[in-house]
Image (cartoon, rainbow, N blue to C red):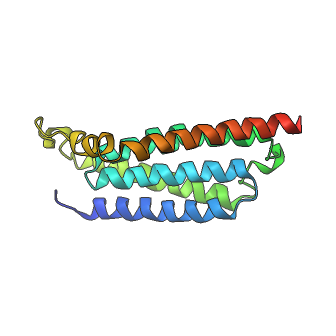
């Protein structure tokens, strides 16, 4: 794959947004706002994976981490009532809105430039006989099956613990 200016610009843009979102994630006082910044970081990481031809890892990043794990995390935070509604919003003042608008305009300009250049579609470049799931699934369900199952049990125990703590407070 040839990497031109547009590819490098998008890669740098998503990397910068991921780092800024991660820094914002660790500096938030509200756990709900922090979780939403972490979701933004994970979406940017998924975009970077996709740009590096790791489409399966990018899709799993969105489905598992930004989707399922963060929904469970937000559910536990809401169940424990750790965030006050007035603390959830991070956008206070005009500068964050201007920065978000500038980022949106930059992404829109990138899409328009891509459409104007009439880039070839990405899907025909993927070979139909190329299977990206098997090399990942085989080790996961053979050598690392125990670790995979233990992780799911640990997540289940964490959710049960959060529910027990929430019921004790009420």
| Quadrant in the picture for residue 136 | top left
| Quadrant in the picture for residue 63 | top left
| Residue under the point 38% across and 51% down | 47
| Residue under the point 72% across and 51% down | 31
x, y percent for residue 20: 55, 64
- Going by the image, does 92 lie left or right of 158? right
Q: Is residue 170 above or below residue 104?
A: above
x, y percent for residue 78: 74, 39
Q: Is residue 153 above or below residue 27?
A: above
Quadrant where the image shows the N terminus: bottom left
Q: Is residue 115 visible in this depiction of the protein?
A: no
Q: How many marks?
A: 0
| Quadrant in the picture for residue 73 | top right
x, y percent for residue 74: 66, 41
Quadrant where the image shows the C terminus: top right
Q: Is residue 59 visible in this depiction of the protein?
A: yes
- Going by the image, does 135 lie left or right of 86? left
x, y percent for residue 82: 79, 47
- Going by the image, does 26 lie left or right of 20? right
| Residue under the point 79% across and 47% down | 83
| Residue under the point 22% across and 39% down | 134
Q: Return the residue nearer the eye: 132 or 24.
A: 132
Q: Return the residue nearer the eye: 104 or 154.
A: 154
Q: Is residue 138 above or below residue 117?
A: above
Q: Return the residue nearer the eye: 1 or 30.
A: 30
Q: Return the residue nearer the eye: 10 or 146.
A: 146
């Amino acid at each position: 794959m040839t990497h031109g200016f547009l590819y490098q610009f998008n890669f740098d843009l998503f990397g910068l947004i991921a780092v800024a979102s991660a820094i914002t994630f660790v500096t938030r006082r509200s756990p709900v706002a922090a979780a939403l910044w972490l979701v933004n970081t994970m979406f940017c990481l998924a975009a970077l994976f996709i740009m590096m031809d790791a489409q399966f890892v990018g899709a799993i990043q969105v489905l598992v981490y930004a989707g399922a794990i963060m929904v469970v995390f937000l559910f536990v935070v809401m169940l424990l009532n750790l965030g006050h509604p007035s603390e959830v919003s991070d956008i206070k003042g005009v500068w964050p809105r201007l920065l978000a608008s500038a980022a949106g305009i930059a992404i829109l300009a990138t899409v328009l430039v891509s459409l104007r250049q009439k880039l070839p579609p990405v899907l025909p470049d993927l070979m139909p006989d190329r299977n990206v799931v098997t090399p990942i699934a085989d080790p996961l369900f053979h050598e690392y099956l125990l670790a995979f199952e233990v992780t799911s049990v640990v997540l289940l125990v964490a959710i049960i613990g959060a529910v027990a703590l929430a019921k004790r407070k009420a």
